[in-house]
Image (tube, grey):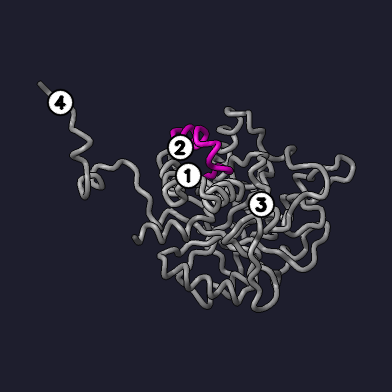
Amino acid sequence: MFQRFRRTRLNGHLRSLVRETNVSVNDFIYPLFIRSGKGVKIEIASMPGVFQMSIDEVLKECEELKRLGLYAIILFGIPDVKDSVGSDSLCSNGIIASSIRAIKKAHPEMFVVTDLCFCEYTDHGHCGIIDEKLQTVNNDATLQISAKQAIIHAEAGVDMIAPSGMMDGIIQTLREALDGAGYENLPIMSYSTKFASGYYGPFRDVAESAPSFGDRASYQMDPANRREAISESLSDELQGADILMVKPALAYLDIVREIKDRTTRPMAVYNVSGEYAMLKFAGLNGLIDYDRVVMETMVSFKRAGADIIISYHAKEVAKLLQK
């Protein structure tokens, strides 16, 4: 009588050969948070192992990342001065533009992605210019300065731009602006389905970007809306996005799979700060087998359809894979 192949026989090399889902260091983009100064490396209490760093420390960090086989990073800037329009992000000598040039000079092999938004640069903590009457972001005015920010990043030498503000029409606006400035081949990774989530809390500590009033629900996705979430990503694909993203990741793997089944574009997930902090503190308190749960989580992202994982765990995963 025919018997199924016994799992007990699937050990060692054979188990690896038949595994359906694999995680590699090449799957990851590692977030870095940059501020001015020299010799600055400040650990964030809500995110153990994650730091705000000055550019000189970031250059050292890139050396460690390369030793681990990690060559892709995404940059977030923390300026000294914030104002209503995020002026530092619109300046060719601002924190992010300066960081791009320094990293590409010292580590030309690093693949540098920039988060294109305004929440880290504005004194109100929202993702664009505020409509004072409505007390929310003015979408069209924000599109105009987003295009300016994209050109500044491109001129500084960025390898990919990732707009995270969830403004309507942002991909088409950026694509037209970049093409018009001669950057037709600069890819755009869209935060195409970004939910108004409670998982972002620790990020707002490290990026110093908590809104000073209200929330971002008027321009981010309702976590309850599945069909709208899929539509948002497919709309960005039509506008010219090269990569689509779901953020957060862990609570939205159903959305990742449904978009993956409908798109021809690569899929990214952002394994966000709250997800990281939950595992980190559970591990520190001996509640879980931390390494095992981290790897299980990464496999779940890949199994759901993610081609790219943006994660604060990336260095830890790289070390585990080296073992």
Q: Which mark is residue 260?
A: 2
Q: Are marks 1 and 4 in contact (CB under 8 Å)?
A: no
Question: What's drawn in magenta, residue-wise?
Answer: 244-263
Pick whichever of labels 1 and 3 is earlier in the sequence: 3
Q: Nearer the viewer, residue 150 or 251?
A: 251
Amino acid residing under circle 4 = Gln
Nearest to the eye among marks 1 and 4: give it.
4
Q: Do the residues labelled 1 and 3 touch (CB within 8 Å)?
A: no
**Above or below — where is 266 with respect to 94?**
above
Q: Measure how far apart labels 2 and 1 are at the Cα level.
A: 7 Å
Question: Residue at 61% of width from left, 56% of height from top?
Answer: 47
Question: Residue at 40% of width from left, 57% of height from top?
Answer: 26
Badge 4 marks a residue whose secondary structure is loop
Amino acid residing under circle 1 = Met
**Within-10-Å neighbours for mark 3: few <14, some 14–19, many 20+:** many
Q: Can residue 282 be seen in this view?
A: yes
Q: Which mark is residue 202?
A: 3
Work out which quarter of the rendered image holds the C terminus and state it. Answer: bottom left
Pick whichever of labels 4 and 3 is earlier in the sequence: 4
Q: Mark 4 points at which residue?
A: 3
Pick whichever of labels 2 and 1 is earlier in the sequence: 2
User: Which x, y percent locates residue 233?
Assistant: 56, 38
Q: Measure how far apart labels 3 and 2 are at the Cα level.
A: 28 Å
